[in-house]
Image: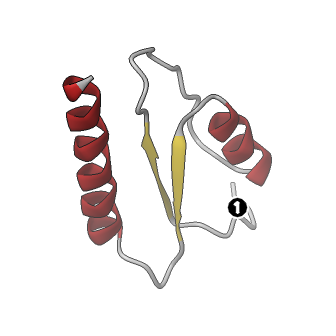
Amino acid sequence: METDFPYRNLIVVNPTEEPIKIDIPVFSEEWIETHRQLGLEVITIKEEQTFLSNFRKAKVKLDQLKSEKELL
């Protein structure tokens, strides 16, 4: 199956304590927006971007959020 989807990969960060089920594969922008509305951070990765550097940035951001929550 071929699609005209503009991203190569996605990174989904769940900063909440609530587990969220994600149906894969993703073939539409609507899917991304739906999951963002659930409170997830969905990072789109285009062909010219690298997964690893985006993953590392997302991990740092999530770790910072967790640290802030622990201080409360």
Quadrant, the C terminus = top left
The kind of secondary structure element at disc 1 is loop
Q: Residue furthest bottom?
A: 48
Residue 28 placement (x, y as % from top left): 75, 51
Q: How many marks?
A: 1
Residue 67 placement (x, y as % from top left): 20, 36
In depth, the one of 27 and 31 nearer the eye is 31
Image quadrant where residue 53 sits: bottom left
Q: Residue furthest front?
A: 72
Residue 15 placement (x, y as % from top left): 40, 33
Near mark 1 (Cα within 10 A), the count class, few <14, some 14-19 or many ≥20, is few
Is residue 13 placed above or below 6 in the rendered structure?
A: above
For this view, does 22 lie left or right of residue 65? right
Which colour scheme appears in the figure? secondary structure
Residue drawn at (56%, 36%), measured in percent from left and top?
24
For this view, does 31 lie left or right of residue 12? right
Residue 59 placement (x, y as % from top left): 26, 50
Residue drawn at (53%, 20%), measured in percent from left and top?
21
Q: Residue furthest right?
A: 30
Residue drawn at (35%, 66%), measured in percent from left and top?
54
- The amino acid on which the numbered mark 1 sits, given as a three-letter code, is Glu
Image quadrant where residue 56 sits: bottom left
Quadrant, the N terminus = bottom right
Query: Label 1: which residue?
Result: 2
In depth, the one of 2 and 42 nearer the eye is 42
Residue drawn at (54%, 28%), measured in percent from left and top?
22
For this view, does 9 lie left or right of residue 68? right
For this view, does 7 lie left or right of residue 45? right
